Amino acid sequence: MKMVKQAVLMALLMAGPAVATQEYILPTLFDVQDVAADDVLNIREAPDASSAIIGTLAPDATGIEVVATDRSGQWGQVNAGERAGWVSMRFLVNRTDVWQPGALPAGFTCGGTEPFWSLAPKGDALVWWTPDGETAYRGLHVLDTGVFRSPRRALVAGSGDQALTASVTPAWCSDGMSEMAFGLEATVILQGAAGPQLYSGCCRIAR
């Protein structure tokens, strides 16, 4: 009986982390799986197998950003060109290397309109762009919450009167121009000669 209890206890201990570990938090990246080499994965206008096809993914496509799922969890929202569509989650497998502690995915970029701006990491800097020019804020720090695979981030770069801080939060976001959908919302505070300025926009992680 003692051996049985020990075996049950060991099983519970081993099962604990697996139950507590979240498989993924959107947005994150997926690879196409189980699609025949001579076939494609359809991107549909709506989360329905009878909906119109607006694009396709190759059977070996990788790094597909899924920004949301429908209520059933069986369809994932992705971008196809300048619009959003839906693919069957049955044919996607999530990547486990996307959201690493204190880091950003390789394809991470943010942008906004009215006024136009973009933001992207480059080495140890955050590169800020507007139609007026480009500025690199050095000394980039990427902060995370400690929640496993959470996309939530805070970005801090620069110093003194030349600093940039950005809060990146998982949330449905629109760029206000296209029909694309984004899964990250960004709020940026820019400190410069003109004083603090506030910008808002969306981020993506697909290359």
Image (spheres, helix red, strand yellow):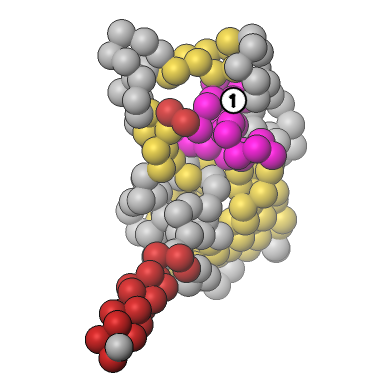
Task: Please provide percent x and percent y for residue 107.
Answer: 41, 41
In the image, residue 92 sits, relative to residue 137, either above or below, namely: above
In screen coordinates, is 67 left or right of 173? left
Q: Of 65 and 168, which appears nearest the observer?
A: 65
The part of the image, by quadrant, that contains residue 70 is top right
Q: Amino acid at mark 1?
A: Trp
Would residue 81 be seen by someone viewing this image from the given angle? no
Residue found at x 48% / y 45%: 28
What's the residue at 58%, 10% (across, down)?
53
Residues in magenta, as a range:
63-89
Depth check, front residue: 93 or 142: 93
Q: Position of residue 42 (x, y in %)?
A: 50, 15
Q: Residue furthest left?
A: 3
**Residue beneath the point at 65% across and 38% down:** 72
Whether 41 is among the magenta residues is no
Return the residue nearer the eye: 188 or 78. Answer: 78
Percent across and percent down for residue 93 are: 39, 38
Mark 1 is surrounded, within 10 Å at the Cα level, by few (under 14), some (14 to 19) or many (20 or more) other residues, namely: many
SS category of the residue bearing label 1:
strand
Question: Residue 198: percent from the left, percent from the top?
Answer: 72, 56
Q: Quadrant of residue 84?
A: top right
In this rendering, the answer to whether 138 lies above or below 61 is: below
* Quadrant that contains the N terminus: bottom left
> Is 81 a magenta residue?
yes
Q: Residue at x 45, y 65 (%)?
A: 19
Q: Which residue is mark 1?
A: 86
